[in-house]
């Protein structure tokens, strides 16, 4: 995805960013040392009862905050929906937050490589949960793991285990928080997924980028948009003429029943498809890459989007 800032989401930082990282670390160096040295004066029991967690993105931060409850202090670095994690420029404040963290949650898969650059300077290093590594997804794979319900469950389990490792005295508390989150907090989200699968499994749909490729299988939907197009839009690379022709044919022939697009990344190619879809009276549903609004919970945000997808499917099924 190119994002609203216009930077490419290909996971590769331009050379100038190396200079900026060096500048951040140079300025933050004394701060990092101070963070490490002053922590020794805090009683161990007091430190252990509140785990300091830093999440690179707020969708993982929301989950960590709910799992940690009163025994975790969670800071999310990227909270602005207009910021592209691929091209994010770290600040001294970010370096300071990471240096003081006991647990860092990063998405990985080339999505937020700046986290590793900052952590390389930290001594001692905080525990790192790299979601891509946890799930066995290599760089170049689809990084949008928070859109896969099964992956979310695995991350929930790992965050819980990491919190318990950081604060063994509150192990039972973290287990209870996980039980609540999985069985109560995520209940509307899981219910919306199940209802779509039950009513619309097998429905052919189109999408603007690879975010939806993570969710469509869980919904039982048949995503027929060429995978190469989805990846190109997500990574900000050129779209092939053959993919455009295929999608145009799918839209004109009503081979898709709804079109799902990321409203945070409307490129000229996506806008052209939206115009065609609307001209053909094909229902549209929107999703976003990060929490919208930024104050939303993970499950509130996702459930709202799922209900929008279900409404579009219902409209398509009714022929209105």
Image (cartoon, rainbow, N blue to C red):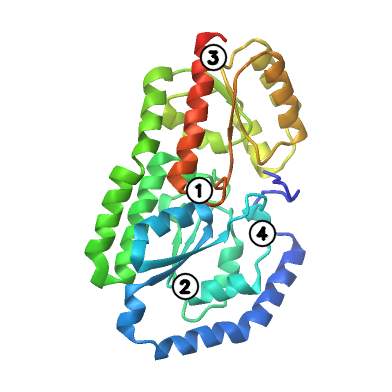
**Secondary-structure class at tag 1:** loop
**Secondary-structure class at tag 4:** loop
**Secondary-structure class at tag 2:** loop
Name the foreground residue: 184 vs 257. 184
Q: Earlier in the sequence, mark 4 or mark 3?
A: 4
Name the foreground residue: 203 vs 263. 263
Compute the Cα span from label 4 to label 2.
20 Å
Nearer mark to the viewer, of 4 and 3 = 3
The residue indicated by pointer 3 is: 316
- Name the residue located 34 percent from the left edge and 87 percent from the top edge: 43
- Residue 240 seen in the current view: no
Nearer mark to the viewer, of 1 and 2 = 1
For the C terminus, give its image quadrant: top right
The residue indicated by pointer 2 is: 101
Quick one: label 3, few (<14), some, or many (20+) residues within 10 Å? Answer: some
Q: Is residue 143 left or right of residue 22?
A: left
Disc on res. 88:
4
Nearer mark to the viewer, of 3 and 1 = 1
Tell me residue 12's x, y (percent).
67, 56
Nearer mark to the viewer, of 4 and 1 = 1
Tell me residue 57's x, y (percent).
54, 56
- Name the residue located 48 percent from the left edge and 32 percent from the top edge: 306
Compute the Cα span from label 1 to label 2.
23 Å
Where 300 falls versus 310 (above or below)?
below
Nearer mark to the viewer, of 3 and 2 = 3
The residue indicated by pointer 1 is: 296
Compute the Cα span from label 4 to label 3.
38 Å
């Amino acid at each position: 995805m190119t994002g609203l800032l216009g930077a490419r989401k290909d996971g590769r930082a331009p050379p100038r960013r190396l200079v900026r990282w060096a500048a951040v670390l140079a300025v933050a160096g004394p701060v990092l040392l101070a963070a490490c040295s002053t922590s020794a004066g805090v009683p161990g029991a007091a430190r252990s009862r509140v785990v300091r967690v830093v999440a690179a993105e707020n969708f993982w931060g929301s989950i960590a905050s709910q799992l940690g409850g009163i025994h975790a202090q969670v800071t999310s670095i990227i909270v602005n929906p207009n910021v592209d994690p691929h091209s994010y420029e770290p600040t001294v404040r970010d370096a300071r937050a990471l240096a003081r963290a006991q647990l860092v949650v990063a998405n990985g898969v080339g999505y937020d490589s700046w986290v590793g650059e900052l952590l390389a300077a930290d001594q001692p290093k905080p525990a790192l949960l790299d979601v891509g590594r946890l799930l066995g997804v290599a760089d170049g794979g689809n990084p949008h793991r928070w859109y896969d319900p099964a992956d979310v469950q695995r991350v929930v389990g790992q965050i819980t285990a990491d919190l318990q490792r950081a604060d063994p005295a509150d192990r039972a508390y973290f287990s209870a928080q996980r039980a609540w989150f999985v069985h109560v907090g995520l209940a509307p989200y899981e219910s919306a997924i199940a209802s779509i699968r039950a009513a619309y499994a097998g429905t052919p749909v189109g999408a603007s980028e690879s975010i939806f490729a993570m969710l469509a299988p869980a919904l039982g939907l048949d995503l027929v948009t060429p995978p190469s197009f989805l990846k190109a839009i997500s990574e900000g690379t050129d779209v092939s003429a053959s993919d455009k022709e295929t999608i145009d044919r799918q839209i004109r022939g009503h081979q898709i029943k709804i079109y799902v697009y990321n409203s945070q990344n409307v490129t000229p190619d996506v806008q052209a498809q939206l115009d065609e879809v609307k001209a053909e009276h094909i229902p549209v549903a929107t999703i976003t890459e990060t929490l919208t609004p930024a104050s939303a919970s993970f499950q509130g945000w996702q459930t709202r989007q799922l209900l929008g997808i279900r409404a579009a499917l219902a409209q398509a099924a009714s022929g209105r």
